[in-house]
Image (spheres, rainbow, N blue to C red):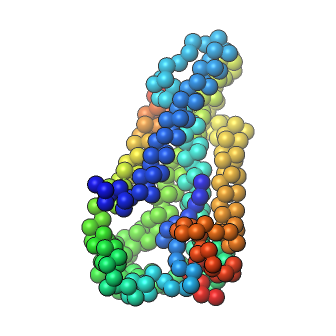
Amino acid sequence: MRASSPFLARRADGQHSEELLGEHASSPGRREETEMQRNPSGALVMFWIWMGTVIAGFLTMAVIVVSGR
Amino acid sequence: MRRFLRDNALSLFFFALFILALFGQSIAGFLRNNEDLTQHGIPEQGYFAFIFSSDFVVDVAENWQSEFLQFLLFIAATVWFIQRGSPDSKQPGDEGVGTDEDQKVGRYAPTDAPAWAKVSGWRRVVYENSLVLVMGAIFVLSWLMQSLSGTVVMNQENAEHGQAPVTWLQYVGSPEFWDRTLQNWQSEFLAVGTMAAFAIFLRQRSSAESKPVGAPYVVSSESSE
């Protein structure tokens, strides 16, 4: 499994994300991203789907192990 | 709905793969377990009895712990270590935790920054390390579950062979536990190390995990060398 963080992804020409933000702040794509940052409901859903899956997995494992099955 | 699917396609894709693979593992494990039971002259187990048994838990947990350890180490190691030319690395000279200005915390935090990035004290310490803390907690819990369920499985096998049961501590010190653990760790470390090194010279066009195809070999992700 690949281990990497998207937060480490940067442009190889040396431009940092904050520079890009300033550079393209008025573009439609950037406006859309800013809108998503203000309303991250979809991202929150995905966060809790994954977190819920992990928590549910642990609870299930704990019940099985404690019951000695 | 279409927008939700498009915006979250990557995590949805992996969630679907995870569910399919876990289901496939449960079917294969169920069939293999029944083969073992038959060979020992023990009545076969039902599917649901198998997936709610320590036999299944130990196989799931041992893989979970190694995957989360892999990410935990990768996240933490890339704070302090660099690999020149790798898209997963900071540029040479940037090793360390960085300044508050670089990290946009405290008085450097923008107005739309997460609330705990704007404050100081324990809340910021927790938030600025929250990824490592959560991944680390999942790793430790998974490893604990592997050891507990492994103890149950070993004691079931010992009972079948007329041997004395082992305690959790005895199991944690057993070759069985470390064989299961290290066989997973070595493959994870191999995969991470090769990825960090391969991505210096190899490319996948338009992947967020690759440098642009025409980027020079020596350029790291943030580097303008």
Compared with residue B224, is residue B184 higher up or lower down, i.e. above or below?
above
Residue A18 lies, in percent from the top left, at: 42, 84
Give left or right: position of B116 versus B35: left
Residue under the image location 43 percent in, 84 percent down? A20
Compared with residue B121, is residue A13 higher up or lower down, i.e. above or below?
below
Give left or right: position of B81 versus B134: right
Give left or right: position of B93 versus A24: right
Residue B199 lies, in percent from the top left, at: 66, 69
Residue under the image location 56 percent in, 84 percent down? A13
Compared with residue B225, is residue A48 higher up or lower down, i.e. above or below?
above
The quarter of the displayed image where residue B34 is located: top right
Q: Residue furthest right?
A: B175
Q: Quadrant of the C terminus of chain B?
A: bottom right
Please name whichever residue, B130 or A53, is drawn nearer the observer in this view of the structure. A53
Residue under the image location 41 percent in, 57 percent down? B9
Residue B31 lies, in percent from the top left, at: 58, 24
Give left or right: position of B65 versus B19: right
The quarter of the displayed image where residue B202 is located: bottom right
Please name whichever residue, B213 or B78, is drawn nearer the observer in this view of the structure. B213
Q: Quadrant of the N terminus of chain B?
A: bottom left
The quarter of the displayed image where residue B71 is located: bottom right
